[in-house]
Image: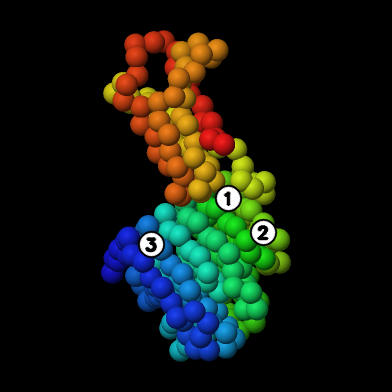
Amino acid sequence: MTARVHGNTISGYGPAAGWNSGILIECGVTGDVTKNFLSAFVRTGGGPGPAINAFDTLSSTHGRFVPLQPLNFEGNTFTNNGQHMILIAANNSRIANNKLLGEVSGVASWGGLQVGGTNALVANNNFSGMTVGTLLFDGTEPGVPPTPAAANVSLIGNWFCNVVTPVKVNPLVTVLQEQGTETNCPSAPIFQSLTRSNGEFLASVRGWHGDSYVIETSTNLPNWAPVQTNEMTLPLFEFRDTKTPASPHRFYRAVKQQ
């Protein structure tokens, strides 16, 4: 089964004693969860009550978690949740270009994003205002049925602002690749890619949400001209320059507006 959850505003009840999740994914579903806004999912009665909860509920009969199908979580915004995302046994899943903002005080939390499974990619996400940014499961968490420790996980280009522990790796996790972690808040924008196709320049720019950046271009480096202004609504945006002159050299930079 394939599912697509796109472009929704999903709000919880706020603090609640019972189960309180916005999106629940289980039992063999694969698909995309993109550009949703999720807020006010808080469980106060013990145990998680995240905005997105992905796991196989057959753990209640199997005594263990069954691996999920590959899932893609991209371009979502999370705010004012007890936990934002819990993904257990999320093999080959992708969590990219999301905003995870804040946590609810006084609620026990494993972190803004909790990931278990093999070959997961966590890339280009912005985390702000929480105790733990990303937690990698290893099957020893209290109250969680047995599940293999996270393995071969890639944490690429994630940025953290006012996060006490950006990445927490439990002891049994194996083969972790981490690069591009940034704890300055906010950080300067960077070009992650720049290619030319059919006379157009295509660029991917990484920045901090809420900031505005001017994309400037030059053919000689001393002289720069603005071509586009972008206000970042997500950590990553695509830029396309369709008015490229016939010049052997063309340079680009992103300048933060004050």
Work out how far the residue at label 1 is from the one at label 2, CA to CA, in angstroms: 12 Å
Point 57% across, 36% down: residue: 258
State the residue position of label 1: 158
Work out how far the residue at label 2 is from the one at label 3, CA to CA, in angstroms: 23 Å
Q: Amino acid at mark 2?
A: Val
State whether residue 67 appears in this view. no
**Between 258 and 30, the one nearer to me in the picture:** 258
State the residue position of label 2: 163
Considering the image in quadrants, where does the N terminus appear? Answer: bottom left
Query: Closer to the observer: label 3 or label 1?
Result: 3
Numbered circle sitting on residue 36:
3
Residue 245 screen position, x and y as percent: 34, 14
- Describe residue 72's horizontal placement relative to residue 174 as left or right: left
Residue 126 screen position, x and y as percent: 55, 53
Numbered circle sitting on residue 202:
none
Point 32% across, 61% down: residue: 6
Point 60% across, 58% down: residue: 128
